[in-house]
Amino acid sequence: MCRIYTVQLFVAMVVLLRPSVVNSFQPLFVSDGNSTTHRHITQTAILRKTAEVCRDIAASEGREFSLTIDDTLSVSQVQMACSSDNSSSILSTVNFHTSIATMFFSNAIVDVVYALSEEHHFDDETFKGGRDVITTGVSAVKASVKDENYIAGRWTLGQVCHTLQDFYSHSNWVELGNNAPYNSLIKPDQTLTNLAGVDVQTCKNCTGDNCKNNILPDVLQQGLLTSGYFNIFSSEKPTGKCSHGGSFDKTSERDPVGGISKDKVGSSHGFLHKDAANVAVNATVELLEDIRIAVGDVPFLRLMGLSQSSVLCFVIDTTGSMSDDIAEAKRVSFGIIDSKRGTPQEPSAYILVPFNDPGVGPLTLTTNADIFKESINRLTASGGGDIPELCLSGLQLALTAAPSSSEIFVFTDAPAKDAHLKSTVTALIESSKSEVTFMLTGVLSSRRRRRSSQGVITRALGQSDAQLYRDLAQASGGQSIEVTKADLSMATSVIEDSLASAVVTIFQAVVNPGRNNNFTFTVDDLTQNLTAYVTGDSSLSFKLTSSTGVSQASNETSGPLASITTAGNLRRLRIRTDNETGIWQFSVTSDSPYSVKITGQSSVDFIYNIVEEHGGAHGDFSLKESRPLSGGNATLMVTMTGSNTVTVTDVSLLDDSGPTQVNGSIQACYNFKLCN
């Protein structure tokens, strides 16, 4: 498998956070190779419960479900088993991977944001407080699912799982001989029993580094529940109480010295680490089942991100001159809905954001196609006059609501009145990894704006106005398509292309200022249905050459390699590969700016996240929300999807404002890859 993987690198200042103090199962990675992380516990539980729900749905529909459900499941296995039509479409696991990553990253952030909160880690015998964190969070997850806000639901769920999992690592539940979850932790109406009182001594000194028998026999015999005290500043703790343990815990230096943590194999009670992790997995499965019962099977699977399809997201200018554009958006969306309803390619959600001046919204976010139809059908073109509109405000609203890696389509024929939001929108594009494609109608060929007979500047887009949209499209990996209103229906084919299953970007380049170039891209035996998109002015020409040396020029609308259609500044090539794997070439001749994007369908793809190393008891990584610091090192967690055999061999960072390329080194990190 050989494919070009590029991630844009942007330059900005970052705010440095204080190092976190990790006192729990390690969040993402381990240094010893033997311990279990929050990431592993969370993902294992999600895959088990998701598979169980799919099995039950299959049974109710009279379908076979052959997958063996255990703790060794992979994302691809579960996605395949849960797909009722996996034989007729290329399978993508990107959405599932991304959703799971959201949950284990939000799980890990608890060790940064709530590092010193006893309740979030069940430290200091705060059992009621810890249970309140869990039950309050679960209620919030259920409410988010009811509101179809699955992004918020996943983020909250990951944090709740962290606290629940820490109970089994930080308390003596496992030492008391329990190998099943303490289900009272997820049931607010049940009483927490057998808690060790504040005056009850629970531990004695460890013998050197041996803490196997430091819990007092009376505590074990009476089945009293306790947890370790933890403090990085003070050694104070109630007399006779157990400590968490470890070099960062000052209380473990005071009698009784030592600890009872089972965070990793090398912890004070590390001999019970695997037992604690196993119960934590089962407890997380139990928590997920509680949510599933409350919300229903289909909403639960949406919460888990189990979908092969994309989100259909439109941001539409509704001013008076946009009636034709609105009609085309209706036609395209209705056609997609009607043709894909009930199939695996049916959009997983629908988002609509109208904008005008001075209004933006209301936002429609729904999984119900009929609700979306009603919302877009109510749009009418009115008002606006001859002034710019709040396009970036509408796009900003869509970016905050859309799931990660969404494709957003913006329809407008006017300049952006709120161009000052460019940096804010760019940051949202980066953090959400969403692609934005602009459908621009009425762009003037010259830099001079059109004036009416009364001398008033009209809505027509000048070149500088259009450049703002081009810049945002480039930053996102999307396109800026400039057509007349009459040709708009020919350009909207890219929307239907994007909603096909398992669409991946194989190659993309933006060249400004224009110059002649010979680009190469690789076609492998897993890639199907290649499509190339070229944007540029009418003077642009190109030649496509296959791996076997067959060529086709841009003036051949139907040739040996592709069928070519033109709409405005867009040339769309439906490439016929005919199993010609290997290196293909795309040669462009142009003195003006242009872009080339080549997509295909493949089960193999990747997701990436920028992470940063932090200090603390274990030293781990957490999600980095801000941009990398210019001139410094950047660490990426790159996850291959759709295959258990494909590995990352090269990762490059490209500056989106120029040809600068930075190559990274690869380090395997327990089923994930890190590029430093």
Image (tube, grey):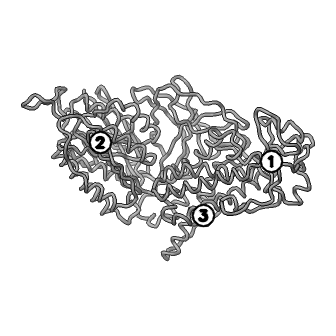
* SS assignment at label 1: helix
Viewer-side label of 2, 1: 2
Alpha carbon separation for disc pair 2 and 3: 42 Å
Residue pointed to by mark 3: 289
Residue 268 picture location, percent across and down: 82, 44
Q: In the rendered structure, which amino acid carries the disc numbered 1?
A: Gly
* SS assignment at label 3: helix
Res 554 seen here? no
* Circle nearer the N terminus (2, 3): 3
Residue 13 picture location, percent across and down: 50, 25
Crowd rating for badge 3 (residues with CA inside 10 Å; few <14, some 14–19, many 20+): some
Crowd rating for badge 1 (residues with CA inside 10 Å; few <14, some 14–19, many 20+): many
Residue pointed to by mark 1: 270
User: Which quadrant of the figure contains the C terminus?
Assistant: top right
Res. 258 image quadrant: top right
Alpha carbon separation for disc pair 2 and 1: 59 Å
Residue at screen point 65% across, 33% down: 614
Mark seen at residue 653: none
Q: Is residue 578 above or below residue 466?
A: below
Res 33 seen here? yes
Q: In the rendered structure, which amino acid carries the disc numbered 3?
A: Glu
Left or right: 621 in relation to 552? right
Residue pointed to by mark 2: 359
